[in-house]
């Protein structure tokens, strides 16, 4: 795939990460970047995320073989309109990365554009070019939503172009896409942010509450740190699906209130049992499905060098440590070091090693 020109509009988390993935497998592809932020553009060129920044949007679009819209959902709609007024090459493919698909596919059809909806089902609560990560999409699902059988060949071209993502490419109907992501991505973001907002008022009454927020609250609210503009756009774009889901959610919480009022132990137990059964049987090990947790928690005394002692111990063992976090939940008493591993074998080896060589207590939760 030499001499192709790819224009990436929006060089934030997803656009810049995709640019890196394209270059990894196709170093000859010429990548042109376009972002509204001068600082982002400068960073993209300085770090060779893109090859060049064009002066004219129109000329750049005309020279491109593939145009990727990696901007917020609403902004992608705006660019479709812009592109519809430009005489692109006949074979130029326009694709996007937006989190919703029905609306954008419909708009592109209205403008008669050669458009294939795309959505990498991996991301982060971080945004912007500084969060760029060429491994972001590894093993994740990358969804395409072609609407015509004739687009099959072009989907293959996009899969080849994005092969450096090492994602698993799948195809979905746009409506089905929005229903699934509504349930598994959009509703969870609403719930996470709702929880944090509810806790805000509570924190004013109980100032110590912030410090005591432990694993449960942290686990379920990480995604509440995502970009507010991005999520406003997503919710509005998928509002019909989400209105139905929120209505179901209200029924769930009302049901639970009713059981609590009536001290219905059996129903409450069944509620948690069903959820556990379902959650425990979700596929693990892969991004895009529910990732397995290979976390080890080590209680470390508050004395100088104890964390360095553990990390230098682990450096001697052939294991893959993917993340280290110091949890402050037990402030002033003892620290908790959260170590995350790539697989269960590494976790078990690390636990054995720490327990044999130190007197620190290790836990799996
Ligand atoms: N963040 C995720 O987890 C994730 C995952 C998959 C898909 N997506 C989707 O991908 C798209 C991009 O998300 P992101 O996380 O990269 O966001 P981001 O905020 O990191 O990046 C968006 C970029 O678009 C630029 N931009 C905004 N308006 C623009 C305009 N008018 N012209 C040119 N550039 C403009 C911003 O300056 C920024 O650099 C969104 O549609 C989002 O829904 C996000
Ligand atoms: O991991 C996260 O932080 C994400 O929110 C990623 C996530 C998701 O909800 O799974 C968010 C939006 C995208 O459309 C796809 C992926």
Image (cartoon, rainbow, N blue to C red):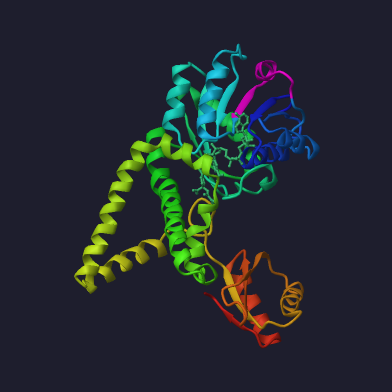
| Numbered-mark total | 0
Across and down, in percent, residue 205 comes to: 44, 67
Q: Quadrant of the N terminus?
A: top right
| Quadrant hosting residue 194 | bottom left
Instruction: Write the residue at 68% across / 65% down.
Output: 320
Across and down, in percent, residue 33 comes to: 70, 29
Across and down, in percent, residue 299 comes to: 61, 80
Please tell me whether residue 242 belongs to the stretch shown in magenta: no
Extreme residue toward the bottom, this view: 359
| Quadrant hosting residue 53 | top right
Q: Nearer the viewer, residue 258 or 144?
A: 258
Extreme residue toward the front, this view: 205
User: In the image, is residue 309 above or below residue 38?
Assistant: below
Q: Is residue 66 left or right of residue 181?
A: right
Instruction: Write the residue at 43% across / 64% down.
Output: 202
User: Would residue 39 be seen by someone viewing this image from the given angle?
Assistant: yes
| Quadrant hosting residue 2 | top right
Extreme residue toward the right, this view: 46
User: In the image, is residue 223 above or below residue 75?
Assistant: below
Q: Which residues are magenta?
A: 54-68
Instruction: Write the residue at 58% across / 33% down.
Output: 71
User: Would residue 142 be seen by someone viewing this image from the given angle?
Assistant: no
Please tell me whether residue 63 belongs to the stretch shown in magenta: yes
Across and down, in percent, residue 350 comes to: 65, 76
Q: Nearer the viewer, residue 50 or 74?
A: 74
User: In the image, is residue 43 above or below residue 131?
Assistant: above
Q: Is residue 330 left or right of residue 255?
A: right
């Amino acid at each position: 795939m030499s001499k192709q020109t790819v224009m990436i509009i929006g060089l934030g988390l997803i656009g810049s990460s995709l640019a890196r993935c394209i270059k990894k497998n196709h170093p000859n592809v010429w990548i042109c970047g376009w972002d509204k932020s001068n600082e982002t553009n400068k960073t993209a060129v300085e770090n060779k995320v893109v090859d060049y920044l064009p002066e004219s949007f129109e000329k750049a679009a005309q020279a491109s073989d593939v145009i990727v819209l990696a901007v917020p959902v609403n902004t992608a709609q705006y660019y479709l309109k812009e592109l519809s007024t430009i005489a692109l090459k006949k074979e130029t493919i326009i694709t996007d990365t937006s989190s919703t698909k029905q609306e954008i596919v419909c708009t592109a059809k209205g403008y008669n554009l050669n458009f294939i909806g795309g959505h990498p089902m991996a991301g982060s609560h971080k945004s912007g070019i500084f969060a760029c990560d060429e491994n972001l999409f590894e093993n994740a699902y990358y969804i395409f939503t072609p609407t015509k059988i004739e687009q099959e060949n072009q989907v293959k071209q996009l899969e080849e172009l994005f092969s450096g993502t090492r994602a698993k490419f799948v195809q979905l109907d746009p409506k089905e896409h929005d229903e699934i992501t509504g349930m598994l991505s959009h509703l969870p973001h609403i719930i996470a942010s709702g929880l944090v907002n509810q806790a805000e008022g509570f924190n004013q009454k109980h100032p110590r509450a912030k410090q005591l927020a432990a694993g449960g609250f942290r686990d379920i609210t990480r995604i509440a740190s995502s970009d507010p503009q991005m999520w406003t756009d997503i919710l509005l774009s998928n509002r019909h699906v989400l209105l139905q889901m929120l209505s179901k959610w209200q029924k769930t919480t009302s049901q639970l209130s009713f059981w609590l009022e009536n001290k219905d132990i059996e129903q409450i137990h069944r509620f948690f049992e069903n959820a556990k059964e379902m959650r425990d049987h979700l596929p693990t090990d892969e991004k895009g499905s529910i990732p397995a947790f290979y976390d080890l928690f080590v209680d470390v005394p508050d004395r100088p060098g104890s964390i360095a002692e553990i990390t230098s111990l682990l450096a001697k063992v052939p294991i893959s440590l993917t993340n280290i976090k110091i949890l402050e939940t037990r402030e002033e008493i003892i620290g908790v070091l959260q170590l995350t591993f790539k697989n269960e074998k590494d976790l078990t080896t690390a636990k054995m090693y720490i327990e044999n060589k130190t007197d620190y207590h290790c836990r799996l939760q």
